[in-house]
Amino acid sequence: MPGAIYAEGLVKTFGDVRALDGVDLDVPEGTVLGLLGPNGAGKTTAVRCLTTLLKPDSGSAVVAGVDVLKHPDAVRRSIGLSGQFAAVDEYLTGRENLQMVGQLYQMKAKQAKVRATELLEQFDLADAADRPTKTYSGGMRRRLDLAAALVVSPPVMFMDEPTTGLDPRNRQLLWEVIKQLVSAGTTLLLTTQYLEEADHLAHDIAVVDHGHVIATGTSDQLKARTGGERVEVVVHEREHIQAASEVLRGFGKGDTTVEDHMRKLTVPVTGGAKLLAEVIRELDTRGIEIDDIGLRRPTLDDVFLSLTGHAAEAKDEGNDKKEDAK
Amino acid sequence: MSAVTDTARLADRGNPLSQSVRDSLVIAKRNLIRMSRIPEMVIFGLIQPIMFVVLFSYVFGGSMNIGGTTDSLVYREFLMAGIFAQTVTFATAGAGAGIADDMHKGLIDRFRSLPMARGAVLTGRTLADLVQTALTLFVLAMVALLVGWRTHTSIGEVLGAFGLLLLLGYAFTWVGALIGLSVRTPEAATSGGLIWLFPVTFISNAFVDSSRMTPWLQHVADWNPFSATVQACRKLFGNPGVSPSEAWPMQHPVWASLIYSVLIIVIFRTLAVRKYRSATA
């Protein structure tokens, strides 16, 4: 049975840019998929296709059990969308914005009013509820935007870079809300550039680049694919580099890389903490003094780098603008 | 947050027409709140027609020949129907700019992802503009009374004339909506919404006696939808300068005004909603 969000072979071109080049996704009900990729990779386009804002050139998609292309209106009843840019009316107050969205979700006026008050409390906006939102800070607007997406507690949520540009406090707040939603059974597709965020919130991760999904799996699976653990040693004396390198060769599963100026050596290993202890003993026996030593597991940054050949934060301005313009 | 309440909330939908009306009113309310929080827009919208009344009355007043007289009071009574009609058509620019502005903000994505009636974003905007037009007309009528304009007919006929004016204004906001959806910036929508109004309002019977134009121009003026409403208003107000032209719209101005306005609404609403939908897809 397909998941709450399911896409097969989504293709979308803008002029000669293939923003989506055959994207497949499957998000089981009640889980979070983190869609990870640099700017211009096609994340936003994928979200726009799945939320009925854009019609894909080809491919199919099912959201909350409904065919997105055949019954977009029915899909709209079951989804909430929170975008990169706070989609609120700046001349309306927070309360008026939420009431309007509630009524457009076909709630009765009175029901929408009650729900707006609830959400303003929940998102710590009660004090600012009756001020026009143009007086809000960036973080407050984002919170209001997310509240608007949650007016009907939709079973499926899409969040496009929900925490981009937020300060740590607001980011933490949004993470908490997201965790509550998911524990209440909401299915969520989240795009992000922050690998830490995907690691923290998502059950599964799909890495997107140039309109393709280039890897999927849990964060641990992706890390394992990138090549396990490494031991990193910083020696105290420059002349010990050679000796330390010989010790590491004995334990390592590959070539040792040396960064001379940092007096740092790195070698891929298997064996975890136990092996680390052995390395320390051996270095000690040989009288090699060390400043630092550690077992380093790959981060999603390493995963990204090894999969795409470029870092996640790398900006591709040309593509980015194209995507924004649509 | 349970599944049961969600379904209950979402199940309540009603028929498509009443949903469309309800959604349009929600959006109209949103636009009216916005207008009330940007009062300078409303005020500028009022100053311009008042300026026209004063300038035309006093600058052109003594030199215009209406029905064989150049009496400036006669011209003032003649002029008002033209100024009223021109004023309602200027709502076009406001509607166009407002919709163009909306289309380039994140909020439109929110609207498009909601289970709301597709045309409601546009209908709501045009309804809000209609309210603003009514307010402008009211203030303008007060100013007109101050400079000496009077009606000489029953209250029913006077109200009927204002009804035709509002209908014409509403029809033109749909032209504005289409312009707003077709341009890239709100600034383009403002100027694009205004330039074509000048020939439409000037090649007409609004400010001069059209029977004194060269024959082909008079022909254009007689059949101009805008002239029909002006002629209807003069007739219903009992003001001087009703054109004696044989052209059908000049002979039956009330019907012509109604038919023209309804046609404009049907054609431009269809085109605008289609354009909005294709932008949505």
Image (cartoon, helix red, strand yellow):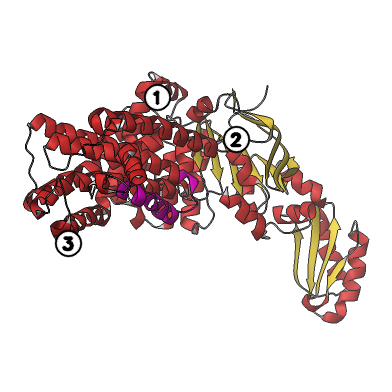
Give B60 or A270, whichever is nearer the viewer: B60
Give A134 or B30, whichever is nearer the viewer: B30
Per the picture, the main secondary structure of the magenta-coloured stretch is helix
Q: Amino acid at mark 2?
A: Leu
**Residue B122, x across and y down, in percent:** 39, 37
Left or right of A311? Residue A191 is left
Q: Residues within 10 Å of mark 2 (few under 14, many from 20)?
A: many
Which segment is the magenta one? B181-203
Q: Dividing the image into 4 quarters, which one contains the N terminus of chain B?
A: top left
State the residue at coordinates (75%, 46%): A222
State the residue at coordinates (27%, 33%): B246
Q: Amino acid at mark 1?
A: Arg
Secondary element at tag 2: helix
| Res A211 visible | yes
Q: Residues within 10 Å of mark 3 (few under 14, many from 20)?
A: few
Secondary element at tag 3: helix
**Residue A91, x across and y down, in percent:** 33, 50
State the residue at coordinates (61%, 37%): A49
Residue denoted by label 2: A50
Q: Reply yes or no: does residue B193 show up in magenta.
A: yes
Secondary element at tag 1: helix
